[in-house]
Amino acid sequence: MPDEPRADFEEHQGDRLAPQRHSAAHVMAEAVMALFPGAKLGIGPVIEDGFYYDFDLPRALTPEDLPAIEGRMREIMAADAPFQRRETSQAEAGELFKEQPYKLELIRELGDTPLSLYTHHGWTDLCRGPHVASTGKIGRFKLLSIAGAYWRGSETRPMLQRIYGTCFPTQVELDAHLQRLEEAERRDHRRLGRELGLFFFDPIAPASPFFLPKGAAVYNLMVAFMRELYQRYSYQEVITPQVFSSDLWKRSGHYDNYRDNMYFINVEEREYGVKPMNCPAACVVYATQLRSYRELPLRYADFGRLHRYERSGVTHGLTRVRSFTQDDAHIYCRPDQVQGEVASIFKMVRETYEAFGLGEPRVTLSLRPEKRGGSEEMWDRAEPILRDALRASGYAFEEVPGEGAFYGPKVDLFMRDAIGREWQLGTTQLDLFMPERFDLGYIAEDGSAQRPVMIHRAILGSLERFLGVLIEHHAGAFPFWLAPVQAVVIPITDSHVDYGQQVKERLAAAGLRAELDAGNERMNAKVRRGELQKVPYLLIVGDREAAAGTVSVRSRGGPQEQGVALSDFIARAQEQVQTKAAPATKPG
RNA sequence: GCCAGCGUAGCUCAGUGGUAGAGCAGCGGUUUCGUAAACCGCCGGUCAGCGGUUCAAGUCCGCUCGCUGGCUCCA
């Protein structure tokens, strides 16, 4: 099945390989207990692409411990010891695991549920199974990393040591997986950001990116793209302050609910908070006038810079930062307009993901959480609106009960990064709460005062995060319309620099982002640099081109074309910008 | 924030308690070349920071900062 798409293939494999991977986890636990007498066991499940097991050990593991554990595991596998299942009682299990406090906790919680034990090689674990027939059937594995993990995922419980491993039926498949991990590293946006001169980080502002000219160019193209959509979808852009008196945050509820993630400043004995979200500012804008039903829906877009304090261990490249901008907008509308607004948002989403060359996002609909505001009736009304709009949008989606915001249900869009981590990008949230807190109203047709519905939405979400995911998705080879440098003109010798300069100027005049590589190097070196920088077009010019007014076009990773009239190239390039054509070739 | 690892030139990295190194990049020169790295030379260091151990610390110890992988969190 070599032609089958990889995602399906791996998903399929993951299910099929679960017994092997889970058995590998048991063997690893046996090996660890042999090497660390007195080790306490947590749990050891199968995960995507592998397995882990959690341990409470007398000392901290280091990466140097892994080969010894792997060695012991190989011995156990070589013994080809059978896995044997047997049922057991609460009492017997309690006795068997009396030295294992974490297991005892699990046994107690399982209560009357039938318990089963799996034994291999004289070593027994509490386990539902299934397992492979014997330790020789596990396949090839590799231990990958060590990490801390709270027992039962709770910050208040002890931190155990987790060992991650991966396992495949054959060495070839294992090697292929390890190679995929290496490839993912090569398309890591943090690495490409540096190599392509897009952005950097400096300890002087932790978790806050600096965008270099090329990165800023892409960033601004993203903003320009959204502004173009706003024009067509009748959004109005506003610009709002960065720092607000804490009075605002008290009113919006952020002071009570989000203070720990905010930056505060004290000036003239008054406390101010740097904005972590734009919504309260939008409400202030809304409230400046008495509103009529005639002017709704009002769609206020705001590219305001947000600052959120994120705990030091959680930040990550561009995908989790402390300073960022969203393609944020807040829509105020009448209840009967919500449906149409949400539908138009999903239309924007589709247009946007296509233009950026991304596949389908994973879409979730988050429903009422336990702790929530508003009446049941409001939720009963709000949830179907989103559900119906989603169905109409054609996106496959998954409903997640209990995950909604306390102020309303929401739809989130997720994309994976190079190593499979998912990041939330766009979001659409119905807000049944904030209009009330800000006492927003409008005068209805019958002259009565009514409360508008507020919709928070972002298509790209954080521009920083979106860019990070976008870089990894394209491995740095942006679609032509987004490429920070669209073409590099490469003169073959000094004598062609003048013509190269003319070419560059004509490209610039045509609205294309072009550079001239006039340095004192052989053209081979310049071609190489252009390819490494993933420039869509390299335009080589020598005697023939200068004489004929043409360029030799080398497409990124693709074919060459000699003697293309400059005007033809420009027309073609402009067309690609217009249509937002996808990259001509596979990124690599 | 928690657990672990890491931090040496702009980048990638070597350096075993005893004189801080290489390649690339940069700079100067030579070369003028037809589709992925021309050649010669030069410059480049608070070994993350602070403190300690030692005759002697990039190397050992402690603290701080930053980064990485997880965990928790993620209005």
Image (cartoon, coloured by chain):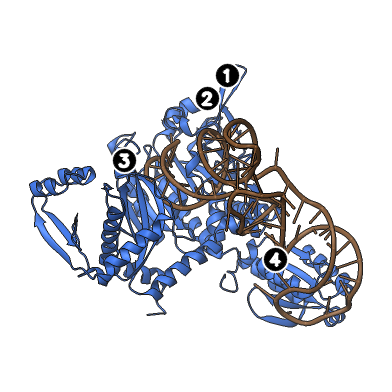
Q: Is residue A393 above or below residue A506?
A: above
Q: Colour of chain B?
A: brown
Q: Quadrant of residue A135?
A: bottom left
Q: Which residue is mark 3?
A: A369
Spatial CA distance of label 2 from label 3 is 27 Å
Spatial CA distance of label 1 from label 3 is 35 Å
Asked if the residues shown at circle 2 and circle 1 are in contact, with their CB atoms under 8 angstroms apart, the answer is yes
Q: Going from the N terminus, do you reach mark 2 or mark 3 first?
A: 2
* Residue B40 placement, left or right of A297: right
* Residue A431 placement, left or right of A367: right
Spatial CA distance of label 1 from label 4 is 50 Å
Which quarter of the figure is the C terminus of chain A placed in?
bottom right
Q: Position of residue A311 (x, y in %)?
A: 48, 38
Q: Going from the N terminus, do you reach mark 1 or mark 3 first?
A: 1
Q: Which residue is mark 1?
A: A270
Q: Going from the N terminus, do you reach mark 1 or mark 4 first?
A: 1
Q: Which residue is mark 4?
A: A486
Amino acid type, residue under disc 1 in the picture: Arg
Amino acid type, residue under disc 2 in the picture: Ser
Q: Colour of chain A?
A: blue
Q: Position of residue A214 (x, y in %)?
A: 69, 56
Amino acid type, residue under disc 4 in the picture: Gln
Under circle 3, the secondary element is: loop
Q: Position of residue A312 (x, y in %)?
A: 50, 40
Q: Quadrant of residue A488?
A: bottom right
Spatial CA distance of label 4 from label 3 is 47 Å
Badge 3: few (under 14), some or many (20 or more) residues near its Cα, within 10 Å? Answer: some
Spatial CA distance of label 4 from label 2 is 46 Å
Q: Which residue is mark 2?
A: A246
Badge 1: few (under 14), some or many (20 or more) residues near its Cα, within 10 Å? Answer: few
